Each structure stands twice: as C-alpha cells, then as structure tokens.
Amino acid sequence: MSDLYAKSLRELRALMDAGDCSSRDIVQSLHERIEAVDGAVGAYLERDLQNALKQAAAADERRAAGEKGAMLGIPVAIKDLLNVKGQSCRCGSKLLEGYVSPYDATCIAKLRAAGAVMYGRVNMDEFAMGASTENSALGLTRNPWDLQRVPGGSSGGSAAAVAADAAIVSLGSDTGGSVRQPASFCGCVGLKPGYGRVSRYGLTAFASSLDQVGVLSKTVADAADTFGCIGGYDPRDSTSVRQALPDVSGAFSGELKGMKVGVAEEFFGVGVDPEVEAAVRKAIEHVAGLGAEIVPVSFPHLQYAVAAYYIIAPAEASTNLARFDGVRYGARVDADDPVEMMKRTREAGFGPEVKRRILLGTYVLSSGYYDAYYVKALKARALIKRDFDQVFSACDVLLGPVSPTPAYRIGEEINDPLTMYKGDICTIPANLAGGSGMSVPCGFSSEGLPIGLQILAPAFSEDRLFRVGHAYEQSTDWHLRKPQLSASRRKTGDN
Amino acid sequence: MPLQATIGLETHVQLNTRTKIWCSCPVNADAPPNTAVCPVCLGYPGSLPVLNREAVRKTVITGLLLGCEIPKFSKHDRKSYFYPDMPKDYQITQYDQPLCLGGGLEIEVGGRKKYVRINRIHLEEDVGKSTHLASASGIDYNRAGTPLMEIVTEPDLANEDEAFAYLTALKRILQYGDVSHCNLEQGNIRCDINVSVAEAGAKKLGVKAEIKNMNTFRGVHRALAYEIKRQLKAVGQGETLVQETRRWDDDRGVTQSMRGKEDAHDYRYFPDPDLAGIVLTVEQIEAWRSGLPELPDRRRARFVESLGLPEGDAEVLVADKDVADYFEQVAAASGGNAKAAANWVMSEVMRVLSESGENVTSLKVRPGDIGALIRLVDAGTLNSTKAKEVFAILLEEGGDPHEIVKTRGLAQVSDQGAIKAFVRQVVDENPKVVEDYLGGKPAALQFLMGQVMRLSRGKANPPMVLELLKEMLAES
Ligand SMILES: [Zn+2]
C-alpha cells in the first residue's frame, strides 16, 4: 500500500487492526512523502527515521500482542516547542541551538504510553510569536496550496505538514489562534481545547495564561482521538483542571437536531474579506440545514480583544522568555561578566518579533504603566469572558470566521506587525476567556485558498465542537480536497 | 531634638521541608553541586511550578506563632531581574497578597520589654549559589527552589541591641515551631537591614540605607552599630544622606555603598500565571492553630508553676527547644524529682554540649537514662558521685544504667554491718584524729568520713556513714 501517508488516523487504525499495514509501513510511507514534498513545503525542522521506525516496531509488537488503542502506531509530528526527551527543542529560535530536552512533556508522555510514534519536529514562529511562521529563525515554511503564500502560524509547520499529507496528525499550540488560524490557511482541522484541559507541562511557555496544546488533523474525528489521548488532569500543571474528559461517543452521529448555534455579527464586522464572509455564512446555513437552530447573539467587547491580548501575552512572555539567558542551556555569546554574557546572548539569539514583544511586555509591566496597561487589559479580558458567558447561555456553540482573510503572500505582511496582530481578532477571544475552539475547512477563495469555519464552545465542552464539526465535515467534501504538490525531491534530504 | 535611629529587618528563613517549593527535589545543602536539581528548579523550557503545601503550612505556623492574621486568599507573583544564579531570571515571590499579615513579638533589652510589630510574612523561592573560581564562575543550583520565608518587621527597632534581641527571639520561635533548621552557618537565616536616622519624634523617617545579606546575628549587631554612628555623624554635621544599598565588610568592620536609588531595579511584579492562588479555609487554619507548639514564654511559666522549678532554672532550660524537650523527658522519667532533672540537664548535659558542640538530640545518653539515675540516687541505691560515673559511661558507650550499676558493682553499700566494720577500722586506725574530734575539732570528722568512703571504694551510703561514725565516736 503506497499511499498510507494520505490516509486519516482512523483509516490507518482500521488498516492496522485488520492487519493490512503496520506502523512501520506508515512511517516508511510518510518518510517517502516527506522526502518528496517537504523540500518545497519546508514544514519539518528535524526527523529521525531510525528512531521513528524503532518506536513503530514497538507499537507493532504491542498490537500483535492484542493491544488496541486510538493512537497505537500512529505517527505524530511535534511542534518545535514541545519537549520530547532526547530531542532538540529549539522553538524556532537560534537561541536554543544545542539544547536537548531532558524530559517528556506530559502530552508527549501520554502519546508515548499510548504507543504513538513521535516522528519529526515541525516549524513555527520563533517562540510561537507570529501568525505566518515567517518569524522562524530556522527556515521558511510554505503553504501547500500556494507555495508563494504563508501557512499561517505560529503552528505553521504543524498545519502545512498535515495539509501536504506529510503528517497524519500533528501537535501545535494555540495562544491567540496559533492552531486554528494555520489550520484555516492550510485547509485542515485545528483544535484548541479549553484552557487547563491539556497539561502545559513541557510546552515551552509563550503566555502561560493563554497557551494551550492543540491538534491539527485531516478530520474532526482524528482530532478528537488525539485530544482524548493528550487531555486530562496533570498534577505537574497547577492550571490543569480535574474535570473528566467529555464523552465524545455521541459526537459522531451527524445529528444536530436540538443544537443551538450562535452567530455574532461583530465577528463579521472586523474587515472580513467578502469571500471569507460568503464561505462562512454558507457554512452556517449548511449547519442550520443539518437541524441546528441558528440564534443571533452579540459579542459587544470584541473590539478590545486584540489590544488586551497584545498587552497580556507580551507581559507574560517578557518573563517567560527571561530564562533564555545562555547560562544553563542553548546558545551563548561569551563576555567577561555574566550579566554582559546574558545581554549579548539574548541580543544575538532572539529575532526581531520576539524582541518587540519582550520590550512591549517589559513596558506594560513597568512601574507607572502597570495600571494603565496591564490592569486595564485584565479588565477587558473579564468583559470578554462575560460576553462568552452571555453567548453560551443562549446557544451551544458560536460560529464565525477563523481569520479575516485567506493565506497572504510570503513577505506581504511581515513588516506591518499591527495589521498582522489585527488578523488574530476572531481567534483571540477564546484564549482570553479560556474557551475551546476549532477550525474546519469550509470552502476556498477564488484563488483556490482554503477558508476555515470557526466553532467556539465553553472551556470544557469540546464534545460540542466535535459534534458540529463532524456533522458539517461529513456532509461536505472540503476536507477531501488536496493541494497539488508536485513530488520533487527536496534539495537537502535529512533523516 | 536628639537624633534617633529607626531600624526595620527583613529576615529570610529557609524552611526545613523535605522537598523544594516547586518540585520534588530534596532540600539538601550537603549534596554535591547540581545533583539535587530537576527541569523545574533549573528553569528548563516548559517546566512548571507546583506549590509545596508543607511550605505553606510552615509559613502559616510561623504566622500563627507570631500572632499574624492569615488571609483566606494569597497568591504568588513574579519578580523580574536578571541574575545567573536565578534559573528563570524571575523569582516567584509574594508581592501584595502574602500568606501572613501583622503580628509581632516581644523582646527584652536591658530589662525593658518591647513589642516589635511584624508587617508581613511571605513565601518565596531561594536562588542558586555562585562560586567564583580563578578562571571561571560556577553555579550550584541545589539551593534554587528551597522554600524561603521572608519576615518583614515594621520600623520598630531603635538600636543594634534591639535588632539582636529581635533576631534571637525570632530564632527561638522558629525553632519552637520546627519550621527551620535555623543553622546560620548554612545560611538558613539571612537578613536585610533598613536603617535611617531622624530627630526623635519626627513624623517622617530619615533617608534609609539598606544593608543586604547579613548572615550572622553578631554581624547585624556590628553593622548596625557602625552604620548608625556613621549616619548620626553625617546628619549631625548637616550632610544630606542619599538612599542607597550598602554592603557590610566584616573584616574591616565598615559598611560601603553598593548602589544608589537611581540604580534600583524595577522588578515589574505581576501575578504568576502558572500558579493558582492559595485558598485557606477557616477550618484548615484552625486545625493548624490547634496543633501549635508551646512557645518559650508559656513553657517557662509552666516549668515554674507545675514543675516547681526556680525562675532562673526555667529560663535557662527553655532557651533551646531541644534542650527543653530533653529536660521534660528527663523529668518525666525521674519519678517526680523535676529539680534534680533540671540540675542534671543544666550542669552535666549542658556542660557536655558546650564542650563537644553536639546537639542534645544526638547524645548517647538518653533522657530516660538520666531519669533512671535520679531514681537510683533517690532510692539510695546509688550515691551522687557514682551516678556521675555512670553518666560518664553512658555518654561514651550508651547502655542501660541499671546494667552498668550492676555489672560494675557501683551500687551503694547501705548494709549497716558492712559500714559498721569500715567505721570500726577507721576509728581504730586513727586514734589521733578521733582525739582531735573529741577535743572540739569538727573538721576531723570530715577526714574520718573520707577514710570510710575510701575503704568502701566510694560505695558506702554517705548519710549512713556519718550517722554510724557519730554514734561510734560518742561511745568512745
Ligand atoms: Zn527540582
């Protein structure tokens, strides 16, 4: 079977269960696919084929011994900011050159225990700061649908790999839309679980109160399976919740009768591209056609979301990134005294966007500015939470666009940070409120670029995302379309 | 108006928890460098802190012992500054909502009592330790993440003696609460001093100097004596002082300017998003309160009232909690002779401790053994000289006092016939001394008595010897 790489997680599991393929076959097939297309896409930073085959062989043995499991033998691509013991974890930065993780992130440990195969580290904006993956210091990642365009970000490598059939599923992280937006740009499914649902232990922190590990996949069901594996309470993360994972067994019926679906016009009033608006509104009608009741709701404080986010996230980041000082790990620029060494290391190691946000965060926490910026941003955050509370008292899920535009051209927006920040407006609210959200493919622009439908739900009601997302996906064929990638050997093959 | 110094102290106390504040690494000052560490206390990417509840308990216990208010909610904040020995380049501490507020403790200087108010107690993490070698610097992160409690006073202290008395009283409470090992050599207690001078009664404090990182109480005393004199002289001469941080040079006995106010850090405190706040229920706080240990003052009073000890003895015994505990166990085993127990502990035990530098808890002589000796003496089985011999043996080898008395034949001879024979022999062999005694020299009796004891190899029951001796002399 030569096209294993193109299959979904559930298809591969069925094949393995039936004895029609092995985990080793899948890894081998993926390897060949990556060799063929990733030269053009550039999703992967590092891969260790031999190690992956070893993990796959172990999974095959477990299956042979009678074990079944959603993730057993399934290869997973890992965003470069998750710690996997023995692997590098450069976070898309030059500064962590040489760092080797001494431990597994909790979500990685869970995948390992379930027999998943950690295969490959994928590109991202440096320290997850960005929305196009252009801020990676380690290489350019292109959108598989149009190689002149960005894959979105910061989990751009995770999305591009899945969209290019160069990964079955991948892990990403979502701080302000970093899973949902690249999923939308690349035409795959992107899940951001509720805050506290997936342990952050081992996820290199960007903004601790907003970060959440997420999943990028080819189908909603695949996202649910992966989520079921990595989610759950973790005593190593004080912000992890003790709530049981939702029962998703009823989420895949295709039935939406009795569901109330909210639509807030504010989400269309933020400079949304007409083609995006048309596709999303059509998707909402389609959902109504599946039996859901459409409920108009309002989200009055949406306009404050971007400003609040770009105060809170940099504030937290300015301290989270302080530890990258060249003292204990990573790159170092030597100097006569330690403090000077730290300065030089950071000066040389961080890219411009990371520096911009550290400066921004340092500024808003400085004495004399704290109340005017940070405290005010917290108030705006509370108002946005309240908006969500009111919305979800009237409906089960909220539907709208993920990003105001489809993927833009490489270099088009990177020098205009403010425009780029504004592109996060539809995804940021879920992070500020701690809610859950998902992007599902819902159409294409006239230029053939994917468009995503955003489904938002309360923090621990991911089952609603799966239910609506799955029903929509299975009654449309957007998710079945594949980008035309000419299989050209990549210039510098590595394994 | 005369000038007057005003002093406030910030005391950092390492808690004696088994594990660190955010991870499960052991708190172990003796481990080889960088062996008691993990991704969390090294600040590795992706690692997260989880609060050690025992550290919270010990901090609250300290607060309760000092009469602090324990708010139902408190939280941790990040304090940002770059320093190589601080793994995350921010310290997790408590900024505006600490675990304990208010409270205070009484000190006594020159017979005058004074109440020193506490402003707050908060719980934070200790940092690593830098060592500077000839060609390079090394950092040991074993200490990083040790739970550190900071106790901040109000500016209630007026001179170096009061500061010293405060630290001594505080240390005693920390020991009583079993919250810290209180080992100053190991840096368990470190102190920052804030000191200023102003006209007595002035509403505004003078310009303060902060003297950082003092690790002996004597050092605090000396540094304050010097600094107060320096400031008094400067202000007296009309100089304007600047707010600054100073360093104490113990060798030269002077304080020196380190940095001025303009170089002060902006620590950019904000709530740590990795940690949920600390919520303490009334039930929890009350449960901890009901388990509080007895403080030295209360214990002293009890020793006087219920054990009948003289004030002076009680004072000496409660000074060190371990010694006081030891004494109580001796007294409990002594068959009700608390005074004898006090005498044993204050003379023999404390002498041994001061000679050997040992801690009372590591002595081979167990409190029950001394209690047994007291009972043997009181029962007339052992005389006090022989009891001290048994004590010396126990000190060296340990063992069972009864066994030792038995196997070494140290039991007192109280057999009338045997003692009478010794007395007869002594009276017969010393006619001149007997004559002296009868002639009105009472000192001669002491000599005869000594001779009888010598003949019995020290085992004769002394009161019985005296009685029989007098009887026999009266007959002659
Ligand atoms: Zn540790």
Image (cartoon, coloured by chain):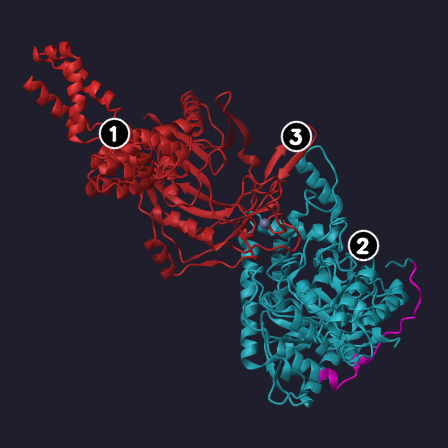
Name the residue at 35% across, 58% down.
Answer: B287
Q: Colour of chain A?
A: cyan
Mark 1 vs 3, N-terminal side:
3
The three-letter code of the residue at mark 1 reads Ser
Q: Which residue is mark 3?
A: B133
**Quarter occupied by residue B311:** top left
Residue B384 is marked as 1
Return the chain for callout 3: B
Q: Colour of chain B?
A: red
- Asked if one can make out residue A355 in the rendered structure from this viewpoint, the answer is yes
| Percent x, y of residue B309 | 21, 37
Along the viewing direction, whichever of A250 and B38 lies nearer the viewer: B38
Q: Nearer the viewer, mark 2 or mark 1?
A: 1
Name the residue at 36% across, 31% down.
Answer: B393
Do dots 2 and 1 share one subunit? no
Do dots 2 and 3 share one subunit? no
| Element on which disc 1 rests | helix
Callout 3 crowding tier (Cα within 10 Å): few <14, some 14–19, many ≥20 = few
- Picture layout, residue A344 above or below residue B467: below
